[in-house]
Image: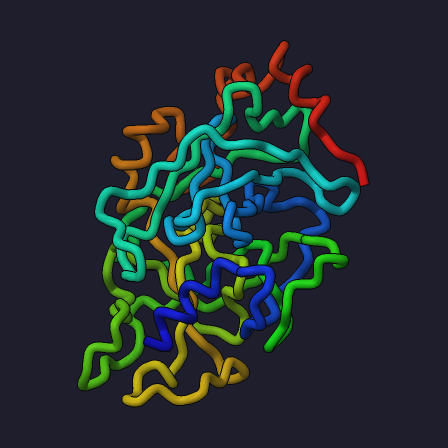
Amino acid sequence: MRAIIRCVLLCLAFTSSVHAMVLGEVDTDNRYSSVGYTLTSAGGFGSVVAIDPYWVLTAAHVVESGPALMVMGDTFGAEGLYIYFEEVITHPDYVSGEFHDDLALIKLSAIDPINPDVVDASFATLSNVDLSSGLPATATITGYGLTSVDGTFDGTAPIVRRYGAAATDPTGPMPPSFDPGFPIDCSLSTLLCTYSTTGGAPGDSGGAMWLDYGAGEVVAGINSYIFDESDLVNPPGEPNWDDGYWTVGTSTSYYQDWITSYVPMAMFGDAPVPIPSAVWLFGSGLIGVIVIARKKKS
């Protein structure tokens, strides 16, 4: 049960005291501007990935309580663009508290699209490469999660996006003699795993795990949960994040058909796809004028 509680905490509750881990560098150059964050109606916090002007992808457990709003854009020079939701679609096989099919699509309000001409945001290319066919040596994990061990959310501190490189793990740990209650077989094409002292933290759920197959980074996984060796003994011990832990994401390639059934313009490939002109047009014109009025300056 410890692992289930830990996974839920990856979607941060503002009032919680939680374990976290330093997640690399602050994204001051907006390299990963397709990654934003969401606030939920129950006071939760998680990350999201923009895939076209009207849709974002996230982890299903992030939006179980219902999202309130989303923020996209450069949070270093401004607060970014506040965007409201129209509909949340969780994967039909997702079950609350279980560790499978942890994906959700969020449809944005018709008057609140993500407009690259207005806000410093982009649309991610999702990977169409089967994860079981081989992995690059490292993945880049991105999100808006906490960065200190045993940290708490500080409402006065800036909310910033971070990224960090972690070694991919194509197999996972040696399975224990009992069922730990969550998937640990990293050879499955549904999961992308890393093992490193850099990894996901509370608030990073729903953010992106990027792989580079040689021609640029694509989103190969959506952050879902973390675990360490202490979860593989019975009873579980106290986690030691300092010597490395697993970050697990839900594969985008495995769920390509489900994603494109709702978002036919979502971009898939083994390299970044230039944003088609049709996508840019969706986020421009009169709608862009409406959206610019919503941008809040710090």
Location of residue 35 (image quadrant): top right
Q: How many marks?
A: 0
- The answer to which of 133 and 43 lies nearer the viewer is 43
Left or right for 41, reference 291: left
Colour basis: rainbow
Left or right for 75, reference 31: right
Image location of residue 216, percent across then percent down? 50, 45
User: At x 56% / y 67%, what residue is drawn?
Assistant: 16
User: At x 46% / y 63%, what residue is drawn?
Assistant: 138
Q: Is residue 116 above or below residue 258?
A: above
- The answer to which of 105 and 121 lies nearer the viewer is 105
Query: Looking at the rendering, in which quadrant would you find the C terminus?
Result: top right
Left or right for 159, reference 99: right
Image location of residue 141, percent across then percent down? 51, 58
Q: Is residue 120 above or below residue 14?
A: above
User: At x 28% / y 43%, what residue is drawn?
Assistant: 91
- The answer to which of 71 and 280 lies nearer the viewer is 71
Image location of residue 92, percent across then percent down? 24, 42
Image location of residue 174, percent across then percent down? 26, 81
Query: Looking at the rendering, in which quadrant would you find the N terminus?
Result: bottom left
User: At x 70% / y 62%, what residue is drawn?
Assistant: 154
Left or right for 115, reference 75: left
Q: Is residue 61 above or below residue 228?
A: above
Q: Is residue 97 above or below residue 259?
A: below
Query: Would residue 196 be seen by someone viewing this image from the given angle?
Result: yes
Query: Would residue 220 be seen by someone viewing this image from the given angle?
Result: no
